Image: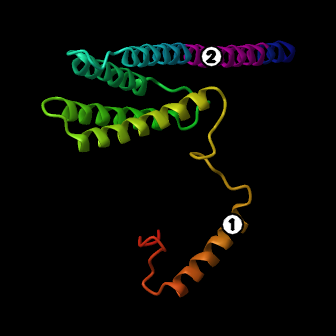
Amino acid sequence: MEKTHLKIKYKIKVKIMLLSVFAFVLAGCGQKEELEIYKANMNQFFENIRLIDSSINAIDPNSETSTAELLSLLDSMDTSFAQMAALEVPDGFPGVDELADDASAYMSEAVSYYHQAYEGEYDASYADVAYQNYEQANIRFQYIVSIIHGNIPEEIFTYDDDGADESNQANEDTSEDNTENPDNESADGEAPNP
């Protein structure tokens, strides 16, 4: 009777282990499938941006329709950035979700300002603000490309190897700053973080 009971326990343990391994493999397959879908969507996004960029560069500036063509292509770029930001980012791409949201927001602002700059009489100040937003969107786009290719840009992600020593150094620096600047403001005029 005890041998039968041990065999049943053994069979149950084996089944549980097999189910665990099977579940682990399925979870891995799901993550791999999610990753492949994301990469395919991002490749499509990159291709869309490449085509839009080529089309923008091909616009004849002397054409009567050049402004309408440009604004239409910028609208398409804005839509592509919004779609990219809506993608579910799988694990393994740190910060891409936030960068994508930021890039999309900057692109939307850029396109809005480009419309204000070019619809009606040209307004250079709107065009300048549009260009600044466009540049910010593209900086984030380049960061995303780097991260997807396995390179995490140091400009956006830093970490402390020895947090205790640097924490003490930061406290000492803050003390020195407070004695040098009695108003408790930083050198650039902003109040320090509490």
Could you tell whether 121 is left or right of 169 in the image?
left
Amino acid type of the residue that numbered disc 1 sits on in the rendered structure: Glu
* Magenta-drawn stretch, dominant element (helix, strand or loop): helix
Report the disc number at residue 17: none
The image quarter in which residue 79 lies = top left
Image quadrant where residue 24 sits: top right
**Can see residue 57?**
yes
Residue 30 among magenta residues: yes
Residue 172 position in % (x across, y down): 64, 78
- Amino acid under disc 2: Lys
- The residue segment tinted magenta is 11-36
**Residue 11, position as x, y percentages in the image:** 78, 12
Vertical order, 173 against 21 (above or below): below
Label 2 crowding class (10 Å Cα cut-off): few <14, some 14-19, many 20+?
few
Question: Height in image: 143 above or below 59?
Answer: below
* Numbered tag placed on residue 166 in the rendering: 1
- Answer with left or right where residue 100 lies relative to residue 160: left
- Tell me what residue is drawn at x 60 percent, y 19 percent: 31
Q: Position of residue 156 (x, y in %)?
A: 56, 45
Cα gap from disc 2 to disc 1, whole angstroms: 38 Å
According to the image, label 2 marks what residue? 32
Which quadrant holds residue 68? top left
**Closer to us: mark 2 or mark 1?**
1
